[in-house]
Image (cartoon, rainbow, N blue to C red):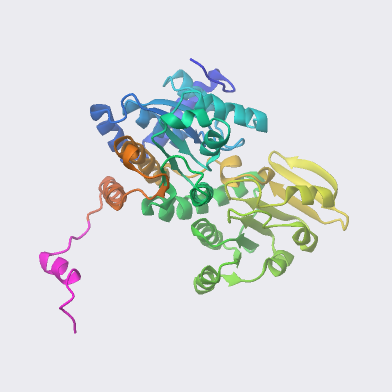
Amino acid sequence: MECDIKDKSLRELGKKRIEWADAHMPVLQQIRARFEKEKPLKDIRIGCCLHVTTETANLMRTLVAGGADVRLCASNPLSTQDDVAASLVSDYEIPVFAITGEDNPTYYKHINQVLDIKPHISMDDGADLVSTLHSKRKELLKDILGGTEETTTGVVRLKAMAEENMLACPVIAVNDSETKYLFDNRYGTGQSTLDGILRATNTLIAGKTFVVCGYGWCGRGIAMRARGMGANVIVTEVAPVKAIEAQMDGFQVMKGYEAFKIADIAVTATGDINVIDEPHFELMKDSIIIANSGHFDVEINKKALAKLAVEHHEAKPLVEVYTLKNGKRIYLLAEGRLVNLSCADGHPPEVMDMSFANQSLAAEYITEKGKSLEKKVYKLPEEIDTRIAQMKLRALGIEIDKLTPEQEKYLSSWELGT
């Protein structure tokens, strides 16, 4: 079987970790059991560019159970768990093209090896697969039924493509499902970002001034968890409504130029470029820790930081120290890449359970409806989103109320009032 991974001998540990994650992903288990019986993805080829983690492994198993022919590559050079890749290849016979720390040419070589399957469905986290498909591998578009996109940054790219009439297939914005962004982005990113910072630095969070750049759902989660660990949290924003929301949630809100003067830790989560830029570095206090939780490594201007530094070395794995002319040191985590996946294991399986349930059911939806959809970005239908929430509640042993006929009539009526 064609593959490109670090070391097949790591398979035993990888399999144990995949099984551990699976035990905490009951919704995906239910979908896999149904897929095994019904085979809704029979003869469908799916090219996947996702973080190669234990949770992703269980998504791959679910797609295969549904009858799909699957190939997987990494959506970030530092997020691959090599033992998981080894187990997927050796234990589950799923072709994987991903190695931790791979360079840029290898990263795109792996994307092309996934596209060599001539996929009917693309499954992305950041839209690198679908953008390569549209720019370098256009001859494959004739076979595409549609795609799915996991993350906010990828959805932004895809909507830009659609706006310019460049999108040649329908894409489901999995990130826009409530059972994804309300939980994965907020609770998953919030916890795993703090986990990554702690694993990389073992720094004390309590009492520190912690700056969160961006108050989208990921920023909300990071701010929430940092405050929970005792940090004094400051939020920087460019959107007025989000800034007011952060203020009313109890966080300080100020401009980056002021926040970075007093920050002990600063984390970006905006999806935009150069959020921490050259003028900011010169304002920072000595020994500040900076990290990124946005999808791409563009939020911290690394080139400007390197230019300002008179000395640079690795203080410890995935922690680089840049010393400026004024003697102040800036500690950059994970090369400015996703700190939660580069320095830790990423989101917990309990939240990825719902995210990957969305991916699985989106693949089924595209298989059924793809040929009739327009070439634009869609949300997954609300009834599917609701079904996932219901499955999660059942798995948690939680029962909720139902509207009575009288209540349903009241909510649908305009005649009844005061």
Residue under the point 69% across and 43% down: 335
Looking at the image, can residue 285 be seen? Answer: no
Q: In this view, which residue lies farthest toward the front?
A: 165
Q: Dividing the image into 4 quarters, which one contains the C terminus?
A: bottom left
The image position of residue 401, as x and y in percent, is 19, 60
The magenta segment: 400-418
The tally of labels here is 0
Q: Residue at x 60, y 40 (%)?
A: 342
Question: Which x, y percent locates residue 417?
Answer: 18, 81
Furthest residue toward left? 405
| Residue ranking furthest to the top | 1
Q: In this rendering, would 381 be left or right of 115?
A: left
Verify whether residue 51 appears in magenta.
no
Q: Quadrant of residue 27?
A: top left
User: How far from the left and from the top, in percent, is residue 247?
Assistant: 54, 73
Up the image or down, 84 lies above or below 162; here it is: above
Residue extending farthest bottom: 418
Could you say which quadrant of the image residue 171 lies in? Answer: top left
Task: Please tell me which residue lies in front, 61 or 124.
Answer: 124
> Is residue 325 something that shows in the picture?
yes
Closest to the observer, 314 or 410: 410
| Residue 402 painted magenta | yes
Which residue is at 78% across, 63% downward? Answer: 283
Left or right: 10, with 143 as reference point = right
Q: Position of residue 315 (x, y in %)?
A: 76, 42
Q: In terms of secondary structure, what is the magenta stretch mainly? A: loop
